[in-house]
Image (cartoon, rainbow, N blue to C red):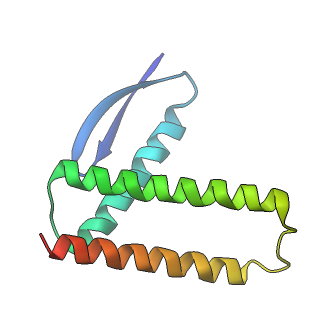
Amino acid sequence: MAQVTIRINGYTYLVGCEDGQEEHLTDMASDIDRRITSIKAIGGQSGEARLLVLAALLLADELHDTKATLEMAKIVKPPKTASSEHNARLRRITARAEEIAADLSGH
């Protein structure tokens, strides 16, 4: 088992993973760190646990949307162009970011 040191929000963590998965684990940690940076940019500083919870919720929301999209793809013929789907996704992300900003500014 490999050991990888990852950095999220300025904190380092030593995490174990299967051999050969080190780069994948590092990429996932970078994704989480980018999300936390985005959350902080929207609403300023917040507690470490709160930032991690918000990042986890954003990831869970994205996973939920992806699963729903895959289920719909099984039922509905894929659209000819991805631009309308892309625009809808951007609108959802914008709305979610505004919700987070409103939530963080209220605390």
Percent of width and height locating residue 43: 22, 73
Residue ID at (74%, 77%): 82
Q: Is residue 102 above or below residue 34?
A: below
Left or right: where 16 falls relative to 107: right
Q: Nearer the viewer, residue 25 or 71?
A: 71
Residue ID at (64%, 53%): 67
Q: Is residue 9 above or below residue 87?
A: above
**Of all residues shown, which one is farthest toward the front?**
75
Please give the count of numbered marks on the rendered protein.
0
Percent of width and height locating residue 22: 50, 32
The quadrant in which residue 15 appears is top left
Percent of width and height locating residue 59: 46, 54
**Quarter of the rendering occupied by the C terminus:** bottom left
Residue ID at (35%, 55%): 55
Q: Nearer the viewer, residue 21 or 41?
A: 41
Q: Is residue 75 above or below residue 1?
A: below
Percent of width and height locating residue 30: 41, 51
Left or right: where 32 falls relative to 106: right
The quadrant in which residue 80 appears is bottom right
Q: Nearer the viewer, residue 36 or 63?
A: 63
